[in-house]
Amino acid sequence: MARCAVESETRKLGIDILGAVPWGTHICQFYDTKQDLIDVLVPYFQAGLENNESCICITSETLIEKEAEEALRKAIPDFPQYLASRQIEIIPATEWYLKVGTFNGKRVFNAWIDKLKEATSRGYDGLRLSGDTSWLESADWNKFTDYEEEINNTIGKYRMLVICTYPLYKYGASEIMDVECNHQYSFIKHEGKLALIGCYESKRVEEEGKKILRAASGKPITPLQKKFIRGGFKDLGESAGVRLIFNLCRYRPECDKDIKKCVKQFKTVRALLSASDQELQRSGLCPRGLFTIKLFRELPAEVLKQKIIERSIYKSSREIFDYLYYSMRDLKNEVFKVLYLNNRSQITDVIDLFEGTRDSIQIRPREIVESAISHGAAGLIFVHNHPTGDPSPSKTDTQLTRDLVFVGMILQINVLDHIIIGENSYFSFADDGLIQKYQDNFLNLKIKGVLTSSPIYQHYDKLPRGLHFKRQVKSLSNIISHLKRK
């Protein structure tokens, strides 16, 4: 990295592990808790304020603006005067990094340079700053790492000190390596003490630090994990599968008791993944555990949804059952899904439209019609579950399906099926011939209502068996023409 004359002037950093550093130093802290962050930022900014530097603290969700100010006020006797004179500013990340709604690295970098010019014009020796990244989302990751690289390559020209803070719980190994490459020093709190995990000046320190980082961010593979790699869940006992999932939570030691309680309570992987959010929270599971369980639950459902949408054409009720059974079999309440199809019988979307109780669900046909029109659907498939496990249709299910077929016939939106999912089984109105029956019933009523006084009504019983709106004819005029030809 390019250096200039300011490098020879060192500044007290306030962080014992690094001591004094030259202007143009770019540092990274990986932290696990809010207190880890406070323990570094307070002495860091205290040293800057006492040494005639302008300071800027960019806060995020881990340590919000008010909490940062309280921590600094508590530790630094003259902090109110520093704050009043604007020698230190505390700015939320949303107002700094996302000021225009999106992240723009060039804009942010230029803003730092402007702040440095302002600081020196007011008589300060230089600019000391920190920026937290818990606001950062994956969509902005590449742009942000490019921005960090630019800072790392050019900061040596400026009278600036920078600490970028990254929450360990949010980033994986590849992201951590990206971060480390873009900083001169990286450190983490390990066993209660700060430890270097990267340093341009010392390869030995770097290698040793990486070992510490691996220990902090992910434990070596366990015997249980090795067993799963060899044979999957089938080689594990019921509770072992639950323990395996919790292996990935990266929970703190104080959560061990809650984890053991969950393993005992849920016993099997299926019971754990089918537990409601309320049940998981009542069990005392920590936030990381809740996140992991929700990820395991939602990921297969999302994959299956994409698979069914990407199918070239809808073929059978069995396909629908195979794709949706996993996501619906353990639902505690009835859920009514609508699958929308285009005029080539391709499924374009799957929506959860209604949710009820364990024994009933209120369906509003008007909302189904509105959603079908908004999706531009040419066809519909309805799917709902019976939490009791018995997929047999109730009287209400039968009446509802008949009404929806009738509405579809009027709007020329084809209702292909209504599938009820139970325990390892399902019921299909189409497979049972009921969709066809309701379509014929509709035409029967339509013809009787319109043609009762017509001389051709006497020929109604001569209509070919199975004649219905979907296949042989497209409108009532087709039926009349057909009868006249007879």
Image: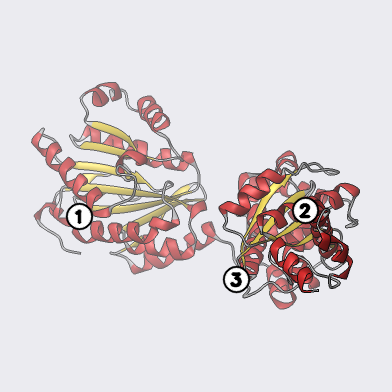
Task: Quickly name the residue at label 1.
Answer: 155
Q: Residue 310 shows which numbered tag?
A: 3
Q: Nearer the viewer, residue 9 or 104?
A: 104
Nearer the camera: disc 1 or disc 2: 2
Tell me which residue sits at (15%, 60%) in the image.
3
Judge whether residue 424 can be spotted in this image: no
CA–CA distance in space, label 1 to label 3? 48 Å
Residue type, numbered disc 1: Ile
| Tags 1 and 3 touching, CB below 8 Å | no
The residue carrying pointer 2 sits among few (fewer than 14), some (14 to 19) or many (20 or more) residues within 10 Å by Cα, namely few
| Vertical arrangement, residue 230 with respect to residue 255, above or below | below
Q: Nearer the viewer, residue 404 or 178?
A: 404
Residue shown at the point (24%, 56%) measured from the top left: 151
Label count reads: 3
Numbered label attached to residue 373: none
Left or right of 243: which side holds 214?
Answer: left
Which residue matches tag 2?
450
Q: Position of residue 280 (x, y in %)?
A: 72, 44
Name the amino acid type tagged 2. Answer: Val
The amino acid at mark 3 is: Glu
From the viewer's perspective, is residue 126 above or below residue 460? above
Q: Nearer the viewer, residue 255 or 278?
A: 278
For marks 3 and 2, give the CA distance: 42 Å
Which comes sooner in the sequence, label 1 or label 3? 1
Which element is circle 2 on?
helix
Earlier sequence position, callout 1 versus callout 2? 1
Q: Quadrant of the N terminus?
A: bottom left
